[in-house]
Amino acid sequence: MPALPGGGTRAFLVRPRRGADRHHHRRGGRWRRAGRPRAADAPGRRRAVPGQAVRPRYGGLVTVAAVNALSRRWALAADGRAVVFAGPGVWPLLALIATGADDTARAELEKALGTAATDAAAGTVVDLLGGCPAVRFAVGLWSRADLPLRKTWLDRLPPGVHGELTGQPAVDQPRLDAWAGEHTGGLIDRMPVQVDRRTLLVLASALAVRTRWVRPFTDTSIRPASGPWAGGRIAALDRTTHDPGTVTVVDRLTRLRVEGTDGIDVHLFLGEPDRPAAAVLAAGLDTLSTPGTDALSGGPGIEVSTVASTDARDRYVAVVPRFTVRAGHDLLALPEVCGLTTVADPVHSHLPGISSEPLAVSQARQDALAEFTTEGFRAAAVTSVGFMAASVRLPSATVRQVRVTVDRPFGFAAVHRDSGLVLVAGWVAEALTPRGEG
């Protein structure tokens, strides 16, 4: 970064506010092997422990572009309330369901998937996640003992993920809840779908992301002068760097990138005050790979000033909100995102490739959580689909400083740095008060 006349430099401050609304399976750097699944109608079968998970092998069903496209459509459903969602938690389940669907249902699911329902392509997002130490991912399948499952469909699942449902909700639900807690490190302690005596099969995924900031923040607070968070002091986090890439402007958005360990970046998106949440979040996801312009050009929430400094480099000061966001989603209410309308038909079964018995999706839900703190970021999502029977240093110089203050609702996304896969994304609609102030 060029120095100013007389030895000064520029300094940049990015400052959002804290907001909150109210397999081989990777453990400790090693993969834990489990038994292979067997067809439900195989005599003398030995089932895996319910929820045992291994590294998935979907044979190329998933592409980063397709998953990110699903996440973008989900972002367009944002209505201004706090939200967090995980596209990679939904996509593999839709792909598995599509491989067992008839032509009508498969066409709808393939539209949601953005690709053909085939496992012939090479390379998968699931394998990518399995190689990222910041991410844990697991798949689970549970079915009633008397439900025959097609071996060809079971063979598309990772080995060792098939458990049994007893048909007794008091027994089955705690087991499913325990699986959710185990595979998210306790961040989500229950399975989103609730089983009952009609539940014949449950298909689920668990995704957990944990990263520590390369440069941690310190606690502070700010008092927004305008916007929905005006009128009170809110908890925030403060950090200064000299990296011009931490704050850029593109498509009328100010973007703050916070670098985490193990290949994870968290991006914050601040739009103009009157820009809808869906437009801000979707534009943020669309422009993740777009370089953008220098923050000195100005943008939403950006303040450029000249300050005293002992370092000739420009400064980028970030004051960002500490936030916690939780959300629950009914995936059946998101047909444009998930494409589950046809397979949820309770009268006509559209899943002949899963079982010889007529099946219909009865529930499909995702529960998700994201937390942005002084030391790092963590997020988790559990997605589940239930099936029932179908009836069918002292200052010595001056520098310029860019200050970005996020003092109104904003979007965020956690991204796998190398591939660009959006792991979770969301919207912070409410701010938290500083500790000790109510």
Image (cartoon, rainbow, N blue to C red):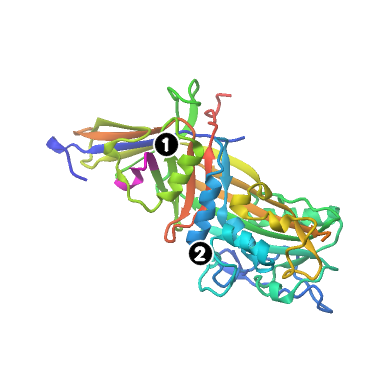
Toward which corner of the image does residue 389 lie, by quadrant?
A: bottom right
Above or below for 98 versus 228: below
Q: In which quarter of the view is residue 147 placed?
A: bottom right
Q: Is residue 296 left or right of residue 222?
A: left
Q: Can you tell which mark lies on residue 179?
A: none
Residue type at the position of mark 1: Gly
Where disc 2 sits, the SS reads loop
x and y, in percent, of residue 315 in the image:
28, 39
- Quadrant (top left/top right/bottom left/bottom right) for the C terminus: top right
> In the picture provided, is 302 more to the left or to the right than 222?
left
Q: Which residues are magenta?
A: 243-255
Residue 63 marker: 2
Q: Residue at x 46, y 58 (%)?
A: 262
Which residue has dot 1 on it? 271
Q: Is residue 222 left or right of residue 102?
A: left
Q: Position of residue 368 (x, y in %)?
A: 61, 47
221 shown above or below 132? above
Residue 424 x, y percent position in the rendering: 53, 50
Across and down, in percent, residue 286 comes to 43, 50
Figure check: 31 above or below 79: below
- Res 372 seen here: yes
What residue is rendered at 76% in x and 63% in y? 142
Name the N-terminal-most of marks 2 and 1: 2
Give whichever of 394, 137 is nearer the camera: 137
